[in-house]
Amino acid sequence: MKGEPFLEQIKWSAEGLVPAIAQDVHSGQVLMLAWMNRESLALSVEEGRAIYWSRSRQRLWRKGEESGHIQRLHEVRLDCDGDAVLLKVEQVSGIACHTGRASCFFARLEDGRFVAVDPVLKSSAEIYGPAGAK
């Protein structure tokens, strides 16, 4: 993994992370923002699916490991400053957010407040079960 030349082109944070934006390869919709470390990015490329670094759990997080809503990786891009990556993915099931919405960016600023404007496609309880609802 350390020998992957593309990993050396990234400006990793002091914590060894880089922000990763997931975008639907077909619609162009921005699905979510997560974090990646060297291992998660290298494994994503190797396995052809999005694998992130969970800062809260301090471990690798294979998107969809609990929900089944995996992201098939189609393309990886690096921004002009080298400090953010864009993952073009196919979102399996059309749900990227743990709230059961297509995108994590479902709240829009209206009259000084953020308001949920995108529908819940599947409840958290349906996705994770009653004990795992977030």
Image (cartoon, rainbow, N blue to C red):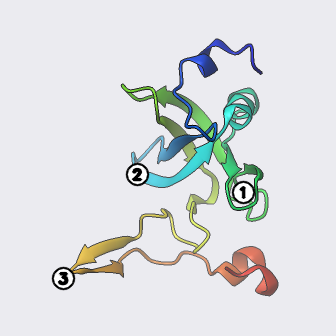
- Quarter of image, res 67: bottom right
Q: CA distance from mark 2 to mark 3?
A: 24 Å
Total numbered badges shown on the rendered structure:
3
Residue 105: where, in percent of width, then height? 42, 64
Residue furthest bottom in the image? 130
Left or right: 123 as drawn, with respect to 119: right
Q: Would you name the residue on which mark 3 appears?
A: 111
Identify the element where label 2 is drawn: loop
- Where 128 falls versus 103 (above or below)? below
Please provide percent x and percent y for residue 24: 48, 46
Residue identifier under label 2: 29
Foreground mark, 3 or 1, reads 3
* Callout 3 amino acid: Asp
Q: Amino acid at mark 2?
A: Gln
Label placed on residue 64 = 1
Residue at point 53%, 25% (across, down): 10
Location of the C terminus by quadrant is bottom right
Image quarter where the N terminus lies is top right
